[in-house]
Image (cartoon, rainbow, N blue to C red):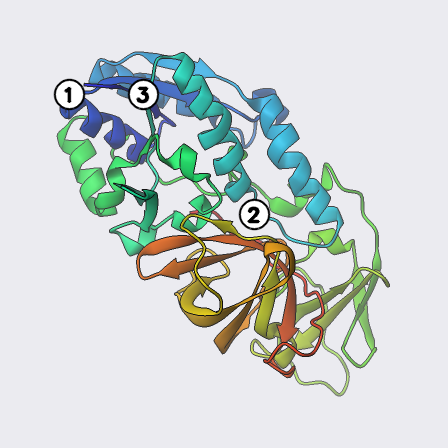
Amino acid sequence: MSRVIVGLSGGVDSSVAALLLKEQGHDVHGLFMSNWDEDDDDAYCTAAADFQDARAVARELGIPLHRVSFAAEYRARVFQHFLREQRAGRTPNPDVLCNREIKFGVALRYAERLGGEFFATGHYARVVHTPQGPELLKAMDRAKDQSYFLHAVHREQLARVLMPVGSMEKQAVRERARSAGLPVFDKPDSTGICFIGERPFRDFLARFLRDEPGPIETPEGERVGTHRGLAFYTLGQREGLQIGGRRGRQEAPWYVAIKDSARNTLVVVQGHDHPLLTSAALTTASMHWLISPPALPFRCTVKVRYRQPDQAATVHAAADGAVRIVFDTPQRAVTPGQYAVLYDGERCMGGAVIETVAARAQDESGTRSSEPAPDRRQARA
């Protein structure tokens, strides 16, 4: 059987992936990646503990474990882009770039150096090899599906990738780990930014971006507060605005609706479903296709954030390989800097960065220009 290098993170999913591949007779090696500087933040960095868990799993399975750091590549290819987008008033999704550039980029090439024919991970998605090339499918466990985060991986990378747990339910994965005696069977799932982890996001961001205070206003121009810098706020955000009761106004929650970079102004509205928080359409950057590009226009479903239910839409051609997506039902908090990912049933067709959005009140035919809207950070599952 072939040699398979498994990205062994110290979690239950990658551990079971290694277990299943070994049971299939493959020559399995583990590869532990610690790609954030460990001494950068001792309070939140879990790399040391995760490595010990990975060692325990490798010992239980009787497989070699290699350790490597791609911290320099991560900072250059993922984190610097993340900071640039934040400074520009957009909200990027670093997990998408992390998968393309690190896990299925430099790590895949490193696996080749270790003699690996395939590189395997514990992602909840499925790769099916067809005569036309590999296809990326949703996981069997729809609640854990991670195909959204994998849509930007190149097809030639997917051709050498295995995702064994993508065909299993999460509870079955934990039970398989328990019955095999793997010490991480009940370890909690990781969350937060890829390789950085879960930590107070604003405090973390403040280490890299300076405060640039400005006014918080209503759409009518009434000043209701002061923000610390547009980069620290996201579309649809409710917490942390520090807007008290206003004379003559109902005591309803405030939400971030617009980040006006030209005026360094945060525009807020009252009401979860305020029209300024919804969009009828969006335009992307150039599409990254995981299939042969279909003739436009076409119908499909779209996700504009992780865990969002599929949304029916029509996809139209736009300039320079971009597309314009018109939703059947207006969507809340569509976010420039995040990704629109297209699906044909369970098959992921590809996706692209969201560039601009059109408000619900605009003409859905696309004859009016759309205004950029701000964003909301999505947590990683």
Q: Tell me which residue sits at (69%, 47%) in the image.
A: 85
Q: Earlier in the sequence, mark 1 or mark 2?
A: 1
Q: Is mark 1 on a helix, strand or loop?
A: loop
Q: Is 180 on the left or on the right of 110, as rendered?
A: left
The amino acid marked with disc number 1 is Gly
Question: Could you classify mark 1 by the number of other residues whose Cα lies within 10 Å: few (under 14), some (14-19), or many (20 or more)?
Answer: few
Q: Tell me which residue sits at (38%, 12%) in the image.
A: 114
In the image, residue 326 lies at what x, y percent?
53, 73
* Residue 102 visible to an observer of this rendering: yes
Mark 1 = which residue?
25
Question: Could you classify mark 2 by the number of other residues whose Cα lies within 10 Å: few (under 14), some (14-19), or many (20 or more)?
Answer: many
Q: Is 100 on the left or on the right of 31, as rendered?
A: right
Q: Calculate the distance from the C-alpha at mark 1 to the C-alpha at mark 2.
A: 37 Å
The amino acid marked with disc number 3 is Glu
Q: Calculate the distance from the C-alpha at mark 1 to the C-alpha at mark 3.
A: 14 Å
Picture quadrant of residue 71: top right
Mark 2 = which residue?
93
Q: In front: 138, or 226?
A: 138
Picture quadrant of residue 252: bottom right
Q: Tell me which residue sits at (42%, 33%) in the image.
A: 157
Mark 3 = which residue?
117
Q: In front: 212, or 310?
A: 310
Q: Do the residues labelled 1 and 2 touch (CB within 8 Å)?
A: no
Q: Do the residues labelled 3 and 2 touch (CB within 8 Å)?
A: no
Q: In front: 297, or 171?
A: 297
Relative to 164, residue 226 above or below: below
